[in-house]
Image (tube, grey):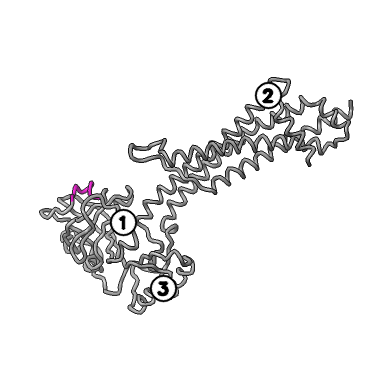
Amino acid sequence: MKFPLYIAKRYLFTKSKNNAINIITIIAAIGVFAGAFSLFIVLSGFSGLRDFSLSFSNEFDPDLKAVPGTGKVIKISEEQFGKLDNLEGVSTYSKIIEERVFLDFKSKNHTAFLKGVDENYQRVNIIDSSIVYGTWFAPNEFQVVIGNGISRQLDISTFNYQNLLKIMVPKPGKGQISMTNISNAFTSKQVIVSGIYSVNEELDDQYVFSNLNFARELLSMEEDEFSGIEFKLNPDYSEEETLKQIESIFDKNVVIKTRAELNDALNKMLNSENLFVYLIFTLVLTIALFNVVGSIIVMILDKRENIKTLFSLGATPKQIKRIFFFQGMLMTGIGGLIGLVFAIILITLQLEYDLVMITPNLPYPVAMKFGNILIVILTIATLGFIASYIAASRSKKAYYLYANS
């Protein structure tokens, strides 16, 4: 093992008399360097974009959310609330009532979701930190907080007491709505907009927040009826174990969703994009490694006399093959390692000094993750192994030429 590796290092680091071979070797090394460099940069960029995209939903989505297993309502007794209060894995929880409603303001209309929340909601989620105008609604007041998108569509501002926002919802059990008496088919209430939040374009167009009692009164729901419960977990306890305990309290009549499951579509989209880009850059890296194959084959042809000498000294065909295999692995390993180091330095500089900006106040998001480093190393090692093996196999031809000469 030491003999082939020693010869491989000499071949790799010793300048050849043939200048063309030196150029081909340099081009192959640069190709591996560029492939590893670009692959890590792209993976870090997509990791940053993923974290950036999910950061918006993290302001809105809880750690766990219990929703009805069937229907739209959960009936929860005081005994069940008592058991939830005693769960050590649950830091706090918030009761919610959620339903689609119609908004009307100065003859402008919009469809949204009304989300009635209790006083614990701000401890479960940090949506109130996203308020850009006004304040969070006051408890037990006819006030709501709307998204920035809804505000723009309805042209509504905060604390406009002269023009109130009307929220309407169909009355239950009315069946078909009569076009001649459509107003009787809806329950409506007028409210003050106390605040406007901004999370992302999708959420800003969808949700209106109110206190729990307002939503219950508008929707004519009973005191023990809720649309769901949102949980903030204690980080010192297992999420899976806490989830099972919550399910047992409700006799498995509810569906418990994690934050990832609440953003299932977004996660699938981000994962698909990440995989697609990885495959594209792996293909580019594969093409770059053809240069390594060519470089090793040219080296074998150039070293035919040396191969004859090695055979004369007792080297076996297997050892000769290992020489050029190790040379290919050293070339891809060193080129890939240098490319990875330079990429890590660049990502670190972006994290520290915001070299690339999307807007004057928003740097391009990147993330330094060990998983991406491992992916690059494994990709380079695997493709380098294949390329080196294919190229080293050509040494057998040199052996047969020598044996028949």
Image location (x, y in percent) of residue 404? 89, 28
Q: On screen, 100 above or below 244?
A: above
What is the CA distance from the residue labelled 2 to the residue labelled 1?
A: 61 Å
- Residue depicted at x 54% and y 42%: 278
Name the quadrant of the N terminus. Answer: top right
Q: Which residue is mark 2?
A: 22
Q: Which residue is mark 3?
A: 87
What is the CA distance from the residue labelled 2 to the residue labelled 3?
A: 69 Å
Q: Secondary structure at mark 3?
A: loop
- State the extent of the magenta-drawn residues as a range: 149-157
The amino acid sitting under disc 3 is: Leu
Residue 77: quadrant of the picture: bottom left
Crowding around mark 2 (Cα neighbors within 10 Å: few <14, some 14 to 19, many 20+) is some
Residue 153 in magenta stretch: yes
* Left-right relation of 278 to 183: right
Q: Earlier in the sequence, mark 1 or mark 3?
A: 3
What is the CA distance from the residue labelled 1 to the residue labelled 3?
A: 24 Å
Image location (x, y in percent) of residue 134? 21, 53
Crowding around mark 1 (Cα neighbors within 10 Å: few <14, some 14 to 19, many 20+) is many
Q: Secondary structure at mark 2?
A: helix
Q: Earlier in the sequence, mark 2 or mark 1?
A: 2
Is 73 in front, or is 12?
12
Image location (x, y in percent) of residue 149? 27, 48
Q: Which residue is mark 1?
A: 127
The amino acid sitting under disc 2 is: Asn
Is 76 in front, or is 259?
259
Image location (x, y in percent) of residue 51? 43, 49
- Residue depicted at x 61% and y 37%: 336
Residue 321 visible to the viewer: yes
What secondary structure is the stretch in magenta mostly built from? helix
